[in-house]
Image (cartoon, rainbow, N blue to C red):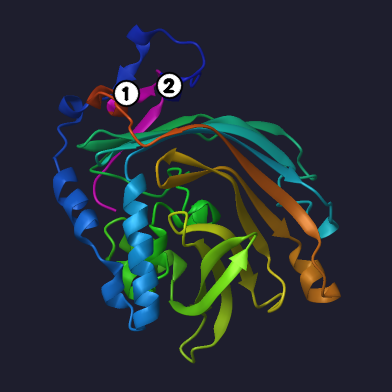
């Protein structure tokens, strides 16, 4: 079925190494981690009663999407060319993805092509596949050649995140629930999907506040601002402003991200959720989303927003009732000659 589509250059199955639980002698740890995730309540880390109530409603709505099967296409496009970006900003990519979460198991495939920055406009393959079958997470990624990894238990982060409608604007933050992100550093550190390595590398120190309600395109939203504290003095280095649609499952239909190094008034990134449809009565899903990035230097030096790039997601199908056999999640095939690393812990 869809997620196994066209992953690997031709090779006979008899020449491939198929890793399964019995082959790796891996320890079953999924049950404990899933129970921790289900019982975790980020609200206990929030002092403000109004914000705590909003986060509680957000967390309850996030549970509606715990089982999810999504296929999508995404297209990134560079809109403006600047000399200061010619070495590090890709020009375009066209990808397709398939994300499945089912009763604590998951599988993700993202594949396509990327056109490099102006200084090196090579076309490279993008391929990332991971699956967790209840015992081990198997990862196959293309990086000039195929590299495989096998982790004991579920492995989050370290590549493309699973598709979640609440966190499209936070895709670099792994599979962390939006309700936990809004609850601050202590809640993030305590969540089972966040490793100590992630906390050390990102140095998250977040503080949230509730800024009332506003109408966005005719939709009544709770407005939550998440500030990033940059030092021990409590100075704010940036913030994300989220507008959560109270009638459509607290989906963040607008998100504005600010980096105060460049501007306190104009965002460096925006995310808009569009084409909202009901998958089931009362459960809404965005079938289109657009993330826009603005040029930092123009914000800093000219005090104006210049659109630098966009990334558009178009959902082809979405279901709240995935129904796959366990073998589907363990069916990550490593081509012959692939370097495979077995990893335990973080």
Expressed as whole percent of the image width and height from the top left, the position of residue 234 reads 49, 89
State which region is magenta. 330-346
What residue is rendered at 38% in x and 57% in y? 177
In the displayed structure, 250 sits above or below 340; it is below
Instruction: Report if residue 27 is visible in the image.
Output: yes
What residue is rendered at 32% in x and 19% in y? 17
What residue is rendered at 35% in x and 15% in y? 16
From the viewer's perspective, tell me whether residue 116 is left or right of residue 95.
right
From the viewer's perspective, tell me whether residue 149 is left or right of residue 316.
left
Q: Secondary structure at mark 1?
A: loop
Q: Where, by quadrant of the figure, is residue 325 drawn?
A: top left
* N-terminal label among 1 and 2: 2
Instruction: Tell me the tag on residue 46.
Output: none
Q: Secondary structure at mark 2?
A: helix
Expressed as whole percent of the image width and height from the top left, the position of residue 38 reads 22, 55
Expressed as whole percent of the image width and height from the top left, the position of residue 73 reads 59, 33
Name the residue nearer the viewer: 86 or 227: 227
**Labels 1 and 2 touching (C-beta < 8 A):** yes
Name the residue nearer the viewer: 256 or 341: 256
Q: Where, by quadrant of the figure, is residue 24 drawn?
A: top left
Q: Where, by quadrant of the figure, is residue 297 drawn?
A: bottom right
The residue beneath circle 2 is: 4
Instruction: Report if residue 127 is visible in the image.
Output: no
From the viewer's perspective, tell me whether residue 74 is left or right of residue 45.
right
Q: CA distance from mark 1 to mark 2?
A: 8 Å
Query: Exactly how many numbered labels are in the figure?
Result: 2
In the displayed structure, 51 sits above or below 165; it is below
The residue beneath circle 1 is: 331
Expressed as whole percent of the image width and height from the top left, the position of residue 201 reads 43, 65
In the displayed structure, 116 sits above or below 165; it is above
Picture quarter with the N terminus: top left
Whether 332 is among the magenta residues is: yes
């Amino acid at each position: 079925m869809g997620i196994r589509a066209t992953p690997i250059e031709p090779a006979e199955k008899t020449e491939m190494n198929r890793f399964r639980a019995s082959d790796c002698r891996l320890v079953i740890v999924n049950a404990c981690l899933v129970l921790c995730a289900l019982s975790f309540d980020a609200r206990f880390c929030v002092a403000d009663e109004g914000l705590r109530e909003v986060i509680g409603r957000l967390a309850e709505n996030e549970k509606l999407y715990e089982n999810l099967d999504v296929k999508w296409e995404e297209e990134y496009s560079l809109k403006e060319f600047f000399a200061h970006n010619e070495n590090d900003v890709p020009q375009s990519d066209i990808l397709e993805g398939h994300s499945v979460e089912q009763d604590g198991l998951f599988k993700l495939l993202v594949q396509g092509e990327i056109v490099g920055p102006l200084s090196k406009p090579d076309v490279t393959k993008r391929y990332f596949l991971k699956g967790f079958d209840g015992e081990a997470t198997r990862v196959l990624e293309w990086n000039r050649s195929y590299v495989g990894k096998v982790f004991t238990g579920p492995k989050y982060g370290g590549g493309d995140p699973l598709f979640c409608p609440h966190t499209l604007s936070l895709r670099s933050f792994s599979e962390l629930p939006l309700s936990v992100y809004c609850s601050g550093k202590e809640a993030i550190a305590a969540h089972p999907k966040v490793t100590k390595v992630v906390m050390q590398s990102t140095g998250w120190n977040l503080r949230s506040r509730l800024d009332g309600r506003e109408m966005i395109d005719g939709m009544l939203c709770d407005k939550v601002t998440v500030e990033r504290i940059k030092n021990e003095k409590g100075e704010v280095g940036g913030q994300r402003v989220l507008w959560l649609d109270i009638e459509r499952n607290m989906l963040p239909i607008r998100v504005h991200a600010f980096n105060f190094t460049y501007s306190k008034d104009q965002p460096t990134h925006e995310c808009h959720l569009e084409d909202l449809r009901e998958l089931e009565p009362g459960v809404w899903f965005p079938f289109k989303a657009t993330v826009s990035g603005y040029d930092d230097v123009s914000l800093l030096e000219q005090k104006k927003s210049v659109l630098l790039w966009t990334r558009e997601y178009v959902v082809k199908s979405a279901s709240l009732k995935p129904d796959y056999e366990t073998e589907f999640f363990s069916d990550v095939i490593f081509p012959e000659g692939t370097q495979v690393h077995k990893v335990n812990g973080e």
